[in-house]
Image (tube, rainbow, N blue to C red):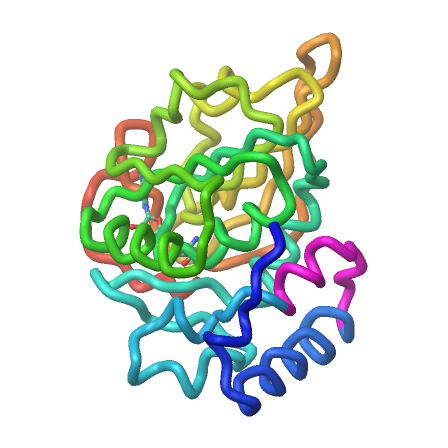
Amino acid sequence: MTKDYSRFDSKERLAEREWMVQTQLIGRDITDEAVINSMQIVPRHKYVMEDKQEYAYYDTALEIEAGQTISQPYIVALMAQVLELKASDNVLEIGTGSGYSAAILSRMAAHVYTIERHDILAQFAKDRFQNQGYKNIEVLVGDGTLGWAEKAPFDAILVTAGGPVIPDSLINQLAIGGRLVIPVGDKGEQKLLRVKKTETRQLIEENLGSVRFVPLIGTNGWSELNNTSIQ
Ligand code: SAM
């Protein structure tokens, strides 16, 4: 997608975003050019509430509407990198939240389908995609733990909330050769897992480290209750 993003940026915001990319991503272990390019372009400050915009490029998760969070930039980059996206990929995201990670993925893949359980978040995200000219993202309000069977199979699936197990529905909707990234554990802390589906439909699982995400709530996730998770 070619798009002039300068209309969303002041000189300060551009400089802050470049600082984020250099120090928090390249300064760590983010090497995928497509991830770096996307994060250089997508205006993260437009995905948070106005009173949080000055913190948008800090090395931290931030609160968004409905008591949810936009994840730490580094975690968004890491998850996008380990999905190993190709430009032709069909991607499913569970947990649209602000829409930021869907926007990042949409610049690296052919199509992004994203599901959010909070109507208000889905609406804000749709408005952002429309304002910023994203035409390859579709948003559904619903229970993402069931996946999106009509749009399957997916070359990549990203779950941006932490569940107790990997939902079978998501495994079933993953293409042969597909990659699924999901935080799995208890409500306080999870392991970030990447699962690859081989030609013989075997699942190869890797643990990418400890993370803290808000709970994945739904039929194949947690039941609804209070939480204190932060990513
Ligand atoms: N990807 C988001 C972003 O870039 O802002 C961050 C999302 S936040 C860490 C996790 C999101 O998952 C929350 O918005 C939450 O409402 C959503 N969520 C939790 N369980 C869900 C489910 N079963 N289906 C869809 N969304 C869910």
Who's the residue at 35% across and 82% down the image? 52
Q: Quadrant of residue 156?
A: top right
With 29 as the anchor, is 176 left or right in this view? left
Nearer to the camera, 117 or 48: 48
Quarter of the picture holding the C terminus? bottom left
Residue 22 spot, x, y in % from top left = 73, 78
Nearer to the camera, 71 or 229: 71
Residue 11 spot, x, y in % from top left = 56, 90
Who's the residue at 30% across and 56% down the image? 127
Residue 187 versus residue 176 in the image, above or below: below
Residue 129 spot, x, y in % from top left = 39, 53
Who's the residue at 25% across and 34% down the image? 142
Question: Does 2 appear in magenta?
Answer: no
Task: Tell me which segment is drawn in magenta.
Answer: 28-40
Residue 125 versus residue 114 in the image, above or below: below
With 66 as the anchor, is 48 left or right in this view? right
Q: Magenta part mainly helix, strand or loop?
A: helix
Furthest residue in direction bottom, as rendered: 12
Residue 72 versus residue 128 in the image, above or below: below
Question: Does 31 appear in magenta?
Answer: yes
Who's the residue at 73% across and 8% down the image? 200
Q: How many marks can you see?
A: 0
Residue 216 spot, x, y in % from top left = 35, 43
